[in-house]
Amino acid sequence: MKDRIEVNGVWYVKETIIEPQQELDPTVYKARVYETDDYTFEASRIYKDDSEEFYEDINIEVTDKSIPKNDSARVWYIDNPIWLYKLWLGEKETRDEAEDLLTPHGLTYLLLIIKELINIGWLKHEK
């Protein structure tokens, strides 16, 4: 057999590469990262399949740098564009929730991010 070799009396067989059984189906997205000393905010939008258009949804991954890296509470997600827009409008219940999650500086920074996301068309709103 030509796919074997003997070294010091031990026979070795050539490895074969196993091909994957299914095709890859990547999710393609575009992101913007905003960072302060206390937080990292990564806003992202997912492209529709084989398209230059985005889905309407937006996701913001929030990393609280004051929490140890191995703590699961360090990273959390805001994936509700309606909630983001209500926060922007200053709705009391949404504002209270945000104040429980972020420091005052973090909340101010998130509001600046929301303003930019509205301005660039990533976050839609009703007039």
Image (cartoon, helix red, strand yellow):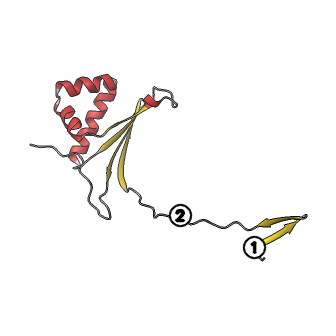
Instruction: Report the front residue among 106 and 57.
Output: 57
Would you place residue 58 above or below residue 85 in this image? below
Q: How many other residues sit within 10 Å of disc 1, few (<14), some (14-19) or many (≥20)?
A: few
The residue lying furthest to the right in this view is 8
Would you place residue 8 above or below residue 1 in this image? above
| Residue matched to label 2 | 20
Disc 1 residue type (three-letter)? Asp
Q: Residue drawn at (70%, 66%), measured in percent from left and top?
A: 15
Dividing the image into 4 quarters, which one contains the N terminus? bottom right
**Residue 113, percent across and down?**
28, 39
**Residue 20, percent across and down?**
53, 63
| Residue matched to label 1 | 3
- Number of numbered labels in the structure image: 2
Res 36 label: none
- For label 2, the SS is loop
Residue 45 appears anywhere in the view: yes
Left or right of 7 on screen, residue 112: left
Left or right of 66 on screen, residue 121: left
Q: How many other residues sit within 10 Å of disc 2, few (<14), some (14-19) or many (≥20)?
A: few
Residue 64 appears anywhere in the view: no
Residue 96 is drawn in which quadrant? top left
Disc 2 residue type (three-letter)? Pro
Residue 12 is drawn in which quadrant? bottom right
Would you place residue 73 above or below residue 43 in this image? above
Q: Residue drawn at (27%, 36%), measured in percent from left and top?
A: 112
